[in-house]
């Protein structure tokens, strides 16, 4: 990957070079230890603390699939692009170090009209605000003209050896916990669809009770993932990007276990339905397991932790993931459920 947004003497137009120089100057404003060389050379140079393992995740967002130019303000697209990558680091218990983002954009999104900021500058307003909050350096990337808007982000983090939270460590008897509330992002997306055409995103950033804010500005659970990693109490973890039913199925498959969820324990977002809490994606909360007898705190860094069920042995003729509601058992397949007995 190229890391020098400004390519001296390269194929960029003078306007693009000016734009890239502005992004670079904003990126280097916040100095991060561990980043020795950032944007401007052929490669970034990272120097993680001695003995740390490197965690890397990559995520591609495409207009029309992962965001909608007519619904999502550029700051929102920038925030969400980085949040998706940071959430994967959180799920591993990794500490963010550096981000690389490559953009493919139609020409009209890189040029400003009059004194107004261009789409790409506002994208970086959202991206860099979240990066600053999590002390993540923007260390490189690339920019190209493209008929379709897309953003590809790579996140680099660090985690001590043998400490990363994996999907594969859950054992029968472990208890299932989740951070925050579920279904808010899905309810927010539905509300956004109803509001399409209106300007969105204003006055929403700080209010997690608003499902629109939950959808537009998801908060990756870095502090909670780091706490779990440092305490060493979680046997497995995953972030909820695709929805509880799908991501819990992934965790069970990797751990070779089954799971039961107690419907009445689910921390459903006040604006969401049970179906949105079970199957709605993009909440970016953490789902993790702890051995029986371990009692996590009620909240971590202001985010509630809720016990929602348990890990069980796989049994023939029994659903991999079951939803218990009183005496009733439903098989909870990824993205759907069916009455079981
Ligand atoms: Mg993930």
Image (tube, grey):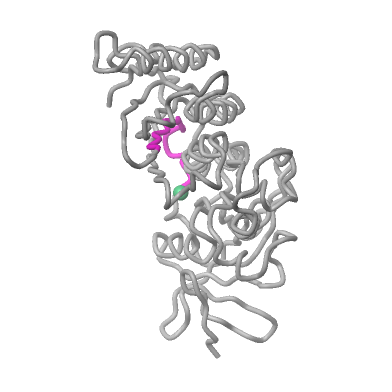
> What percent of the width, then of the height, locates residue 206?
73, 38
Where does the C terminus fall, quadrant-wise?
bottom right
> What percent of the width, then of the height, locates residue 215?
61, 49
In this rendering, would 328 be left or right of 30?
A: right
Where does the N terminus fall, quadrant-wise?
top left
Q: Name the one closer to the observer, 129 or 89.
A: 129
Extreme-bottom residue of the structure: 341
Secondary structure of the magenta portion, mostly?
strand
Extreme-front residue of the structure: 114
> What percent of the width, then of the height, locates residue 170?
49, 59
* Vertical arrangement, residue 199 with respect to residue 2, above or below: below
Residue 158: which quarter of the image? top left
> What percent of the width, then of the height, locates residue 119?
50, 30
Q: Is residue 280 magenta?
A: no
In this rendering, would 206 be left or right of 256?
A: right
Q: Name the one closer to the observer, 65 or 295.
A: 65
Extreme-top residue of the structure: 8
Instruction: Tell me what residue is drawn at x 45 percent, y 55 percent.
Output: 169
In this rendering, would 106 be left or right of 171?
A: left
Residue 2: which quarter of the image? top left
Instruction: Tell me what residue is drawn at x 24 percent, y 14 percent.
Output: 10
Instruction: Tell me what residue is drawn at x 52 percent, y 71 percent.
Output: 312
* Vertical arrangement, residue 115 with respect to residue 329, above or below: above
User: How many badges with numbers are in the image?
Assistant: 0
Q: Which residues are magenta?
A: 151-165
Instruction: Tell me what residue is drawn at x 38 percent, y 15 percent.
Output: 15
Q: Name the one closer to the observer, 181 or 254.
A: 181
Residue 75: which quarter of the image? top right
Q: Is residue 162 magenta?
A: yes
């Amino acid at each position: 990957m190229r890391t020098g947004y400004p390519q001296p003497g390269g194929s960029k137009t003078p306007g693009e070079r000016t734009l890239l120089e502005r992004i670079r100057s904003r990126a280097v404003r916040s100095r991060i230890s561990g980043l020795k060389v950032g944007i401007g050379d052929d490669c970034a140079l990272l120097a993680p603390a001695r003995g740390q393992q490197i965690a890397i995740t990559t995520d591609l967002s495409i207009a029309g699939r992962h965001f909608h130019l007519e619904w999502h303000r550029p700051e929102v697209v920038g925030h969400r692009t980085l949040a998706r990558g940071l959430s994967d680091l959180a799920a591993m218990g990794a500490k963010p170090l550096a981000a690389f983002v490559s953009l493919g954009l139609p020409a009209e999104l890189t040029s400003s009209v009059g004194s107004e900021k261009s789409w790409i500058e506002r994208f970086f307003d959202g991206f860099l605000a979240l990066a600053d909050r999590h002390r993540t350096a923007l260390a490189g990337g690339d920019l190209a003209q493209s008929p379709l808007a897309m953003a590809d982000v790579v996140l680099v983090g660090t985690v001590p050896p043998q400490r990363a939270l994996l999907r594969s460590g859950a054992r029968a008897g472990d208890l299932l916990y989740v951070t925050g509330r579920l279904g808010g992002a899905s309810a927010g997306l539905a509300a956004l669809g109803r509001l399409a055409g209106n300007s969105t995103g204003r006055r929403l950033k700080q209010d997690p009770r608003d499902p629109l804010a939950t959808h537009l500005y998801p908060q990756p659970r870095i502090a909670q993932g780091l706490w779990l990693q440092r305490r060493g109490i979680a046997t497995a973890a995953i972030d909820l990007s695709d929805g509880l039913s799908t991501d819990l199925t992934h965790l069970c498959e990797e751990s070779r276990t089954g799971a039961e969820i107690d419907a009445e324990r689910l921390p459903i977002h006040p604006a969401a339905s049970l179906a949105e809490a079970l199957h709605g994606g993009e909440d970016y909360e953490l789902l993790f397991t702890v051995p029986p007898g371990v009692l996590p705190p009620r909240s971590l860094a202001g985010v509630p932790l809720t016990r929602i069920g348990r890990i069980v042995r796989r049994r023939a003729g029994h659903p991999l993931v079951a939803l218990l509601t009183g005496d009733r058992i439903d098989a909870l397949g990824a993205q759907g459920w069916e009455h079981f007995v």
